[in-house]
Image (tube, grey):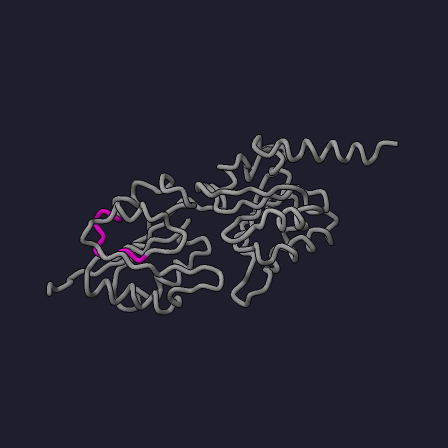
Amino acid sequence: MREIIHPKVTLVGAGPGDPELITLKAILALNTADVVLYDALIDPVLLKHAPETALKVFVGKRVGKHSLPQEDTNQLCVSMAKKHGHVVRLKGGDPFVFGRGSEEIDYIESFGVSTHVVPGITSSIAVPAMAGIPVTKRGVSESFWVITGTTSARKLSNDVRLSAQSSATVVILMGTQKLPEIVEVYKNAGKDNLPIAIIQNGTTRDEKITAGVIGDILPKAQENQVQSPAIIIVGEVVRESLKLAEVYREAILVDAQANRP
């Protein structure tokens, strides 16, 4: 067995789901991997960028279905690096946007294993963009929030309540389980008519978009059987999507008929 003189772990962001939305730097890292530890949201085709001899180990997590606890994944990064050499930790989106990348680095570095980071295209911007929704637009929205819908305590983030008071675009990740609470927050803020879109499996072949306003999104989400993984976008910019123009054109007609004398 060869001696590993310089074990290392590279945290690689794989992008939002579409395998073509991975960076060249990420592909080059995969090209030199001895081990790939990959998440649930990774398109399997990305593993072809690693050498055939590389070990490919699934360590993904889904709601209610955990393959390996985070602590075990951290330990695996260290043990695999010391045993095999270069470990690529392939993570969906960007490792530092709710990806626990910083925690993994802290743990790995504490064992004397060097780490490198390859940023990924974050789903918080790319998924809305691919659906034609700009997170900012001059005259419509001058800023945006990116919030986790569910905290480590399994509660709705208080930042959702704070963001509902602003005019900013709000992008909520991991929030589908909290959709009724999110809707209630915005209703309490008097924003029943604020546009909202839920994009499930964004940028992939299985993408499904459910759009409406705060006041009608719950029955729409139930009818469309919205599930994780999905991203929630709240704000006037949702109306800017040409893909969703028909949704809001119909809403205008319904409102006009309802207000007709």
Residue 230 part of the magenta-drawn span: no
Q: Residue furthest right?
A: 261
Left or right: where 5 falls relative to 55: left
Q: Residue at x 67, y 52 (%)?
A: 183
Q: Where's residue 108, x and y in %? A: 31, 65
Which quarter shows the N terminus?
bottom left
Residue 43 picture location, percent across and down? 36, 47
Q: Looking at the picture, does residue 160 appear above or below residue 65?
A: above
For the point 24% across and 59% down, the residue is 8
Q: Nearer the viewer, residue 186 or 59?
A: 59
| Picture quarter with the C terminus | top right
Image location of residue 31, percent across then percent down: 23, 47
Left or right: 149, with 24 as reference point: right
Snapshot quadrant of residue 179: bottom right
Name the outermost residue toward the left: 1
Residue 120 vertical placement versus 136 (above, below) = below
Which residue is more in the foreground, 259 or 159? Answer: 259
- Residue 250, quarter of the rendered image: top right
Residue 32 lies within the magenta run:
yes
The span shown in magenta is 30-37
User: Where residue 50 sits in the image (x, y, percent)?
Assistant: 24, 49
Total number of numbered labels?
0
Which is more toward the observer, 167 or 193? 193
Q: Residue at x 49, y 61 (%)?
A: 63
Which residue lies at the image location 85% right of the left edge and 32% below the top edge? 260
